[in-house]
Amino acid sequence: MSVKQNNSFAIPAAAVATLACFSANIHAQSSVTLYGELDTGLAFVSNVGGNAQYKATSGLIDGSYWGLQGSEDLGGGNTAVFQLEHGFSVTTGEALNDHPYYVGLGNEAWGTVTLGHQYDSIHDYLAPFTLTGGAGGTAFAHPFDNDNANNSYLARNAVKYASPSFGGLSFGGMYAFSNDAGQFANNRAYSVGANYQNGPFAAGAAYLRVSGRGNTGNGAYDTINLPGSNRSEFDATVQTQNTYGMGASYALGDFTLGAAWSRSTYSGVADADSASTVPSVGFSNYEINGVYQLRPMVSLAGMYTYTKGAGQHWNQGGLQAVYLLSKRTDAYVETIFQRASTDAPAVINSAEPSSGRNQLLVGAGIRHRF
């Protein structure tokens, strides 16, 4: 899970508008945009530690955040760009370190290079073909978000390249430094990916490798949540993580059919709290999904995923309906059911583990974008 911060800050909208106007006067071809999203609602979870749970939710589809995004025309097809996003919980007000912030340079012909706290290539090139990385959002993630298709974690110290489109083909890569003297490869990461778009057809693939994950506090990634014995879960350090996959989609009028496959392996695993070693684990995720624009104001989505682990497996299915109240506000309802194998924890993303093999989530909420 992403690291949480105790401090938060806010910039009054009027001050931001004044700053944007002042910047525009200095350089007529600069722009700064203030934007964001709020997502909150209510949910029922059938089994959390043996009891039914009724709760207020924040981010059942999308994490709530506000952001600043800007660019400056440097001439000759070159542009300076930046993005600052600040995540938070609508229900508690808690600040969350789960959104990007970076600065970089772009060129119309050669692409864009950015530096900062950023998404990896799994998010950019594979996740859009899963329902969790598209219309479905948070609760539709694969068990433990083991492939990061729901972008549960971002890379610190990251340098990233994204190409322009060449006849529908785009590609990119990321390298995240460990920032440790004498330990260049301890908690560092790199990823690559590509996407192809041609009319109604699209496809993508990506690969991520992390070395020494969670070993240091200032490296690329924090610890990761993995399944333990007797339907438990724990925070783990991992010496080697490999995640890769591919996906595709095809639009048939108002219906888009998608499919994705991913594989995540974790070796050299240890419990982050006790430092005791744990057997290596791997996950293979197979997903089929669909999104149907029933009416201009109503969209329906659904998915089924089978996840195979080391001696464990999970079956998960979900449905979602979204109704647009306006261009910027919508209401939604969704339900997700997960059934785990005998000794595996059943845990839908955004919920706590069930005491049994099954878990059902039914939720409803409202989102507003500005």
Image: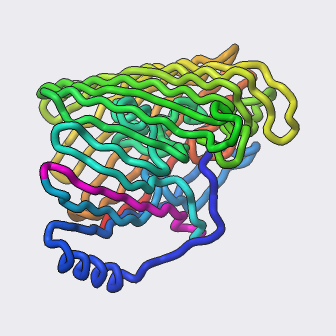
- Decide whether residue 154 is among the magenta residues: no
Image quarter (top left, top right, bottom left or bottom right) of the C terminus: bottom left
Residue 256 sits in which quadrant? Answer: top left
What residue is drawn where x is 57% and y is 42%?
A: 349
Q: Nearer the viewer, residue 196 or 254?
A: 196
Q: Is residue 101 left or right of residue 327?
A: right
What residue is drawn where x is 57% and y is 65%?
A: 95
What residue is drawn where x is 32% and y is 25%?
A: 204
Instruction: Give the tally of numbered discs.
Output: 0
Image quarter (top left, top right, bottom left or bottom right) of the N terminus: top right
x and y, in percent, of residue 36 in the image? 36, 64
**Image height of 141 relative to 304, above or below:** below
Residue 28 sits in which quadrant? Answer: bottom left
**Image height of 265 relative to 39, above or below:** above
Q: Main secondary structure of the magenta part?
A: strand
**Image height of 84 relative to 198, above or below:** below
x and y, in percent, of residue 137 in the image? 42, 44
x and y, in percent, of residue 329 in the image? 29, 64
| Range covered by the magenta-colored residues | 76-92
**Image height of 179 relative to 236, above or below:** below
x and y, in percent, of residue 336 in the image? 50, 39
Q: Residue furthest top?
A: 311
Q: Is residue 8 left or right of residue 121?
A: right
Q: Nearer the viewer, residue 162 or 198?
A: 162
Q: Nearer the viewer, residue 86 or 83?
A: 83
Residue 354 in view of the camera? no
- Decide whether residue 81 is among the magenta residues: yes
Residue 146 sits in which quadrant? Answer: top right
Q: Is residue 195 left or right of residue 362?
A: left
